[in-house]
Image: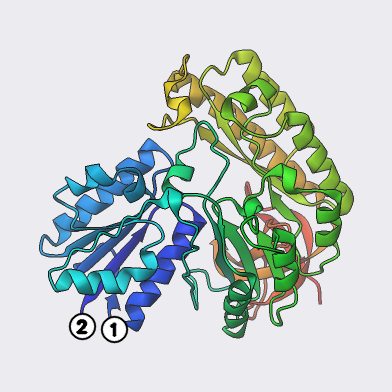
Amino acid sequence: MKKAALHNLGCKVNAYETEAMQQLLEKAGYEIVPFEEKADVYIVNTCTVTNIADRKSRQMLHRAKKQNPEALVVAAGCYVQAAEAELREDSAVDLLIGNNRKKDLLAILEAYEKGVQEDAVIDINHTKEYESLSVTQTAEHTRAYVKVQDGCNQFCSYCIIPYARGRVRSRASSEVCEEIAALARAGYQEVVLTGIHLSSYGLDLEGESLLSLIQAVNQIEGIRRIRLGSLEPRIVTEEFARALAGMEKFCPHFHLSLQSGCDTVLRRMNRRYTAEEYAKTCGLLRRAFDRPALTTDVIVGFPGETEDEFQETVEFLKRIRLFETHVFKYSRRRGTRAAVMENQIPEQLKTERSQLLLELDRENSAAYILEQRGRTVEILIEEKLVLDGTEYQVGHTKEYIRAAVRADEDLTNRIVSARIEGLLGERLCLASLQI
């Protein structure tokens, strides 16, 4: 029996695709082993969102070849699309598989064994085909991430992803629902709909939209929770918010991409909203839902970001008081417009600004959790955790607050009712079971 090892780099979409490829290999009779072990085939599903991601991708490919020089080392995914010529010259890499060809993994491997090296990197910018991959289980045993969309038409000035993933392509809602129904039968109660630019779902399908997809998933028996990946703020209209608020299964947790709270920086980023439009979206969601969790991404040190512009972002984040802010230092990405902009920000200044926003994030996160004290919530239990000698069972509320309860019986993959008592550590809250 041949052994295969897979390693994933990057986002939830990449993780979903890696799991799908692993399941293809398992069905074909491969034994899946940890990446650190000796294998016959190593597959690295690469990421290219930053230069650091490129470097990590190369490191994992070289590590695989070093572990077993006789093994077949396969580079797949976004870095392959962005740096095909470079990887073809890399002696550590035997085979390239670009995006939209991962579904053909077994056929490509079989051809290679017969001495036929198939060209498995397509011109991703000119395909309209959605790559059909599916999973029957995921690495998480209680929550399943399901990819429903690929590609992006936004072309933010700092982002290489439209060049690596191509234009917007949506998965048929019938296919999505079929997979989710199978996951429900396998015991999954919560699904997260993900995509490269989830807000664009349905743009290429007649009569489909992200809202219509959510409504279809809401009808699937056995699914008790529906979450969404990252959204663009402008997708949230009053109609959209009211419709979601009317679904009992929908989780009031919205990850709304911000990137900057300063309009001049947003324009340089080619983001298609203003800070005030973003704030209005937050207000709309807070009117539609009772204390929804709003989270975001922010980039510090974008080219030309002045101290005044950065302070605008700080004051904006203080005003809208989000549950969590994921802070990223701008990473210069070759091939993007931002990479050649003037006034690139020194790394030390990026670090200082990042630390300031991370501290604000800690304050906002603690404040949001403390505001929930006394509320009775539902927690999907996922794992056990020992803190200071005490065993807790830990999961997430519908708002994606990580909460811990004490119980004598194993509650894994059960949704329990509990009362939030307060903080237990920095980002964990303590809750007491309600009988």
In the image, residue 297 above or below residue 9: above
- Helix, strand or loop under label 2: loop
Q: Name which quarter of the figure residue 432 lies in.
A: bottom right
Q: How many marks?
A: 2
Q: Name which quarter of the figure residue 206 lies in.
A: bottom right
At 22% from the left edge and 74% from the top edge, which residue is drawn? 110
- Helix, strand or loop under label 1: loop
In this view of the protein, which residue sits in the foreground, 259 or 380? 259
| Residue 239 visible here | yes
Residue bearing mark 1: 29
Residue type marked 1: Gly
Q: Position of residue 266 (x, y in %)?
A: 63, 27
Q: Which mark is residue 348?
A: none
Residue bearing mark 2: 1
The crowding category of the residue bearing disc 1, from other C-alpha atoms within 10 Å (few below 14, some 14 to 19, many at least 20), is few
Q: Earlier in the sequence, mark 2 or mark 1?
A: 2
Does the CB distance between marks 2 and 1 fall below 8 Å? yes
Residue type marked 2: Met
Q: Position of residue 340 (x, y in %)?
A: 42, 21
Question: Which residue occupies the extreme right position in the image?
Answer: 287
At 24% from the left edge and 53% from the top edge, which residue is drawn? 61
In this view of the protein, which residue sits in the foreground, 42 or 351? 42
Q: Position of residue 226 (x, y in %)?
A: 69, 66
